[in-house]
Image: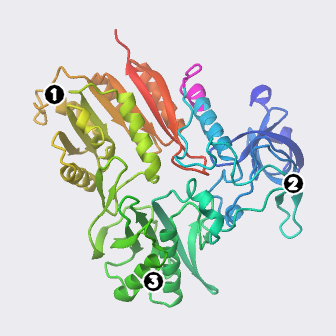
């Protein structure tokens, strides 16, 4: 907190106080960041470049939270958000910013984390690989969501509203939304929350930082077929063909549902999270959803319902793992085909990158950083269903995937088979335990098909929590020559890079990939090499 690091927030501001702030940055959860006498103030409803009047809502020891009361001067990067749920939902924290500004902030955030947490000086971070077909041939704001304008406050809501702008692109149902399709509607997976109220069912998403469900008939990040299926579920609940689980009385079936979409084939999977293996009124439910998908399917985008699965979960906390997966209609998996012709079978619990188009860019950059010459041994750690490693198999000597989730390993082996890849092996377990044993000639897990003289490359693709320290130490102890780290969390990436530096590795450079348009999330690929003694 610069010069006031030892002062408490209460010495600078009081709760309820209205202050004027210049917004200079954005937090990971999409709040604007301003400073008053050195005190950091996180402002909801503000973006970098804004000058706002804000009310202090909460004080912490060394920072404060505030909400925007009036937008005094709008950022030059502000645009009109096209989503009517934007304020209520909070999922798209960057939807008020031009796409170029979104990319600039994401890159800056990565650099800041690498410097502050990773202790790197002036790290090389390439420009963000943005969405493939973004608005404007030059990637600029031509045809963007909107353009900056004057701020006024509406009488009905008291919320800042942008004026002096062109008409907002028609709503999701409008015919003029094609310009947004290339940037938005990118997600191939959606997780819906449900609830039953006296006014009827709610089907949508949890409001950011809350358990409140925002009833949503169209999310602009989702495919039209996805929303058609979700709205069909709403009709099913209205018709009482399915009941919503009531946690207070422990009754009811449906606790939520997930929809997965394969862009390359049109296959869709609907996963009901329910309290039993039996789907009530199964035939009527399935046909209703299938018909809704067919109604929005086109020759260009021919989506269809391929699989219906029940994720059985009776735990009080839905974050607990499911006790079983029961296929009630269709196949056990759905199959996607990527731009480079690879096929991947995806089961209900399997992880798959949510932005299929950008996934191709992500994997291409991984291959570029790996810089394979032929014959290398690739350790694909946190391998999931094997997508990254298998995309490199034709250029490598051997792919060895390690994953702690047994079902994912089964999927990875199957994906190797359907792609005709014979130089890939997959192991179940924690990588820090399995990897050293595979290289230890005295261990029963030792594999003699690895050329001990071949260069070793580790691909790391951990969850948001980053890599376990024991795994990083195991990778270093195996003396891999190069690490390509794929991260969805710049903070934990920077933390792990710092530890790898202590273990004899050096950061070379990183390239972000915008897998999550309109949100603060960003994927980042880092190249890390062993320092030769």
- Say which mark, if any, is on residue 440: 1
SS state under label 3: loop
Residue 184 location (% of width, % of height): 57, 56
Q: Tell which of 251 and 490 is nearer to you.
A: 490
Q: Callout 1: helix, strand or loop?
A: loop
Q: State left or right for residue 119 relative to residue 501.
A: right
- Residue 114 lies in the magenta-colored region: yes
Separation (CA) of disc 3 from disc 1: 53 Å
Q: Nearer the viewer, mark 2 or mark 3?
A: 2
* Residue 57, horizontal then vertical, whole percent: 79, 53
Mark pair 2, 3: CA separation: 49 Å
Viewer-side residue, 256 vs 49: 49
Task: Name the quarter where the N terminus is drawn.
Answer: top right
What's the magenta bit mostly, secondary-structure-wise?
loop
Q: Which of marks 1 and 2 is in front?
A: 2
| Residue on which the image places disc 2 | 151
Residue 499 versus residue 471 in the image, above or below = above
Residue 151 appears in the rendering: yes
Which of pointers 3 and 1 indicates the residue nearer the eye? 1
> Which numbered dot is residue 251?
3
Q: Which residue is drawn at 28% across and 73% down?
A: 327
Q: Where residue 298 appears, x then y in whole percent?
A: 45, 71
Q: Residue drawn 89% across and 68% down?
A: 155
For the residues marked 1 and 2, what is the alpha-carbon distance in whole angstroms?
66 Å
Q: What is the quadrant of the C terminus in the image? A: top left
Circles 1, 2 touching at the beta carbon (< 8 Å): no
Q: Quarter of the image holding residue 268?
A: bottom left
**Chain part drawn in magenta:** 113-124
Q: Which colour scheme is used?
A: rainbow
């Amino acid at each position: 907190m610069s010069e006031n690091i030892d002062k408490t927030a209460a010495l600078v501001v009081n709760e309820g106080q209205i202050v004027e702030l210049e917004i200079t940055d954005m937090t990971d959860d999409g709040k604007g960041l301003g400073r008053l006498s050195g005190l950091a103030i996180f402002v909801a409803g503000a973006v970098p470049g804004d000058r706002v009047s804000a009310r202090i809502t909460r004080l912490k020891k060394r920072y404060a939270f505030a909400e925007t009361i009036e937008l005094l001067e709008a950022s030059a990067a502000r645009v009109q958000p096209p989503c009517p749920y934007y304020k209520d939902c909070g999922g798209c924290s960057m939807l008020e910013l031009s796409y170029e500004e979104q990319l600039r902030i994401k890159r800056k955030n990565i650099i800041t984390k690498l410097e502050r947490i990773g202790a790197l000086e002036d790290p090389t971070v390439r420009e963000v690989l943005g969405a493939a077909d973004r608005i404007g041939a030059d990637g600029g704001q031509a045809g963007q969501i909107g353009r900056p304008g004057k701020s006024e406050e509406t009488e009905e809501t008291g919320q800042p509203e942008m004026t002096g702008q062109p008409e907002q692109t028609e709503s999701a149902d409008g015919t003029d939304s094609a310009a947004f399709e290339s940037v938005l509607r990118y997600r191939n997976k959606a997780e819906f929350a449900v609830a039953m109220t006296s006014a009827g069912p709610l089907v949508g998403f949890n409001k950011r930082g809350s358990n409140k469900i925002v009833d949503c008939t169209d999310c602009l990040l989702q495919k039209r077929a996805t929303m058609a299926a979700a709205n069909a579920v709403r009709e099913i609940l209205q018709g009482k063909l399915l009941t919503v689980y009531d946690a207070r009385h422990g009754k009811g079936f449906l606790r939520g549902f997930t929809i997965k979409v394969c862009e390359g084939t049109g296959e869709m999977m609907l996963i009901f999270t329910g309290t039993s293996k039996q789907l009530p009124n199964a035939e009527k439910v399935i046909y209703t959803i299938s018909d809704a998908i067919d109604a929005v399917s086109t020759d260009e985008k021919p989506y269809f319902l391929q699989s219906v699965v029940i994720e059985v979960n009776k735990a009080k906390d839905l974050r607990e793992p499911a006790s079983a997966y029961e296929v009630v209609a269709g196949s056990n998996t759905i199959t996607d085909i990527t731009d480079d012709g690879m096929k991947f079978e995806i089961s209900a619990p399997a992880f798959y990158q949510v932005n299929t188009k950008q996934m191709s860019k992500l994997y291409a950059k991984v291959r570029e950083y790996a810089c394979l010459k032929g014959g290398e041994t690739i350790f694909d750690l946190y391998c999931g269903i094997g997508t990254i490693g298998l995309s490199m198999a034709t250029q490598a000597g051997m792919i060895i995937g390690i994953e702690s989730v047994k079902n994912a390993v089964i999927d990875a082996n199957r994906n190797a088979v359907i792609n005709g890849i014979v130089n890939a092996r997959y192991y179940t377990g924690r990588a820090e335990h399995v990897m050293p044993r595979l290289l230890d000639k005295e261990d029963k897990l030792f594999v003699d098909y690895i050329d001990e003289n071949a260069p070793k490359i580790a691909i790391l693709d951990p969850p948001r929590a980053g890599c376990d320290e024991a795994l990083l130490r195991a990778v270093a102890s195996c003396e891999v020559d190069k690490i390509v780290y794929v991260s969805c969390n710049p903070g934990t990436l920077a933390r792990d890079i710092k530890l790898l530096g202590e273990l004899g590795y050096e950061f070379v450079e990183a390239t972000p990939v915008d897998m999550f348009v309109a949100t603060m999330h960003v994927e980042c690929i880092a190249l890390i090499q062993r320092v030769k003694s």
